[in-house]
Amino acid sequence: MLDCNLYYWYNPGMKVCTNPAACVGAEPETVLKSVFGYETFRPLQKEIITHVLEGKDTLAVMPTGGGKSLCYQIPALIFDGITVVVSPLIALMQDQVSSLVADGVNAVFLNSTLEWSEYCHAADGIRAGEIRIVYVSPEGLATQRMQDLLHSAGLKISCITIDEAHCISEWGHDFRPDYLEIASFREQFPGAVCLALTATATKQVRDDIVRNLRMKSPEILIASFNRGNIYLDVQQKHDAFRQVVGCIDRHKDESGIIYCFSRKEVDTLTHALSDMGYSVLNYHAGLSDAERSEHQEKFIRDRVSIMVATVAFGMGIDKPNVRFVIHYDMPKSLEQYYQEIGRAGRDGLPSHALLLYSPGDIHKIRYFFDESADSSKSELLLQGMISYAASRTCRRRMLLKYFGEDLADDSEPAACCDICAAGPLPLVDVTIPVQKLLSCIIRTKERFGTAYVVDVLLGSRNKRIVDNGHNMLSTWGIGRELSKNDWFELTEQLIEAGCLYKTGEYNILTVSSEGRSLLVSRGKVELPIQLEGGASDGTKIAAARTPAFVLHKKEKEPVPAKTVDKNDDEAVRIASALKEWRRKTADEENVPPYVIFGDRTIVDIAAKKPKTDNALLTVYGIGTVKAEKFGSAVLRIVKSEE
């Protein structure tokens, strides 16, 4: 892939928007269509680009798949200087450069993987003014070699872009100290506008980004965090492997990522899936650099369908056709979760995010808090994740609310998540169980977590309860009419209702003022809850909630997508032939298939069936360069010519 990038980054025979200089001073809409093949901007893209072109420092928070890259790529072609993009991962640079050069844009990445001769070749192109965009890591930015290059005589830097800008904040989910050095670099180029981009940023993270980059009265634009094409599915683990296989089978022959907590889990799950015949590879820090690179390359190029990985995987991958992301274990924060599920459906087509969780996951995460500089901060982030997983209300609304966004009542169809797909549960009178639960918490002095309180209600004689004398309480053993699962479910619902809350590292249950008033008044309590009743060993699974992929049928996808019409035989033929041609062409060009054409482009070709060069330019994702390079082959396929 490296050799390919260096070959294409400067190809004198390649036409760019007719030529790179032709884009200088052009209108953003012109560049959008002629270079990238898109008719309209996505939400906030035009506003961000306008601020950047006006020279205003800008912080843009946009969801993964929201089109952040165009926000600096289009200005880079309009500016008369170069744009420096600080990016954290080599894979991200390679992906972006591959896509840019396929569209005819002269771009390079400079990092430690380059041979000295390759670096010199790229540097010569930069000094000669032939390069529009330069990608560099934050570590590489600080080297004397890079400083000398970017201060070359006559070289103008128009824009400094910081991608994955949340890495500069200690409140971000992937803090990197090297990012703190970027501010001193940008101060060396006071005439360059600064653009910071991230997919996940709470207000605290946004404030950190602005302060740590020393941005000058920045424009702050926040796009909707709502990824409506991703179905949110959360299940308690009861047979995790079967649950994973069920999700994979719903997405037969489609690309997916499975995240695990540890390397051991990654390897175990990979081997189990491989033994069943699935196309799967592993990815974690225990593999050699060569192995990780090979596995990632096969996944990017659709030579393997499923990647089982630790959180080290995926941050720098711009693969648009990932159809599902499975969390085999609970992430440590909602920021991490949102970033990782955002790797699904970047092309806007329907995708699936499945989260499996258990109390054991929480204990594993807390075990590593000792290594954290601020365990209280880690606990706060974890509590947000726990609340999301245990929620019994619309997950999309809760996720958006965490990032400070409210969802309009009529903006989402009914089946956007497993909770909504299951439909509303009937209200159940739980007055007596609620009274028992609240009383037990108070009688145990509000010093214990849910598991302990439930054990008291179920009449456990474990040593801790006996030693504390809680087997002598009036509430000991009065809750055997419900199962352990029921009591946990009831506790979570009371937390959501504001009658209970959890505090401290051990999630101590405390009764709120509302809960105390409810207990004193002995008022009737009705909640939308599915109770098992009686099975105190907790072995039953509430049918109303699991497995969600039984409840959520494909015909109920949350957002109608542009897919190939199965009733149109000609469209099916065209799409199939295009995918085969794309695979062969990608191999010849030594690039991932989506660099040639994304799935949305293939779907649009199959629907429009263009027969002329002009008609081809109306297709989504086909700009001037791709039309000239691939147009004749595409038209032959559409016309069914040999």
Image (cartoon, rainbow, N blue to C red):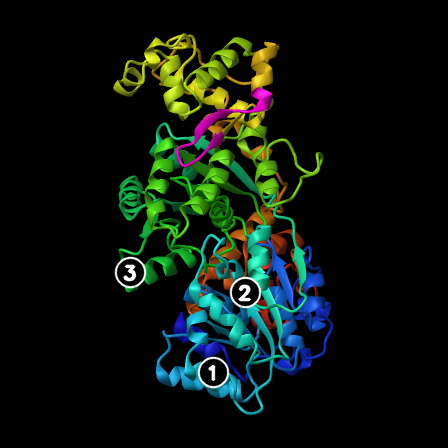
Inspect the image, locate mark 1, and give the three-letter code of the amino acid beneath it: Gln
Question: Does residue 110 appear in this view?
Answer: no
Give the percent coordinates (x, y) of residue 188.
55, 80
Q: Residue at (45%, 74%) from the top-left corner?
A: 5
* Along the line of sight, the residue nearer the viewer: 642 or 80: 80
Question: Does residue 513 appear in this view?
Answer: yes
> Could you classify mark 2 by the number of other residues whose Cα lies within 10 Å: few (under 14), some (14-19), or many (20 or more)?
some
* Along the line of sight, the residue nearer the viewer: 589 or 176: 176
Q: CA distance from mark 1 to mark 2?
A: 20 Å
Read off the residue under disc 1.
Answer: 147
Read off the residue under disc 2.
Answer: 212
Give the percent coordinates (x, y) of residue 49.
68, 66
Residue span colored magenta = 502-515
Q: Is residue 511 left or right of residue 253?
A: right
Mark closest to the chain's N terminus, 1 or 2: 1
**Residue depth check, mark 3 versus mark 2: number of the one nearer the observer:** 2
Give the percent coordinates (x, y) of residue 309.
36, 50
> Could you classify mark 1 by the number of other residues whose Cα lies within 10 Å: few (under 14), some (14-19), or many (20 or more)?
some
Label for residue 291?
3
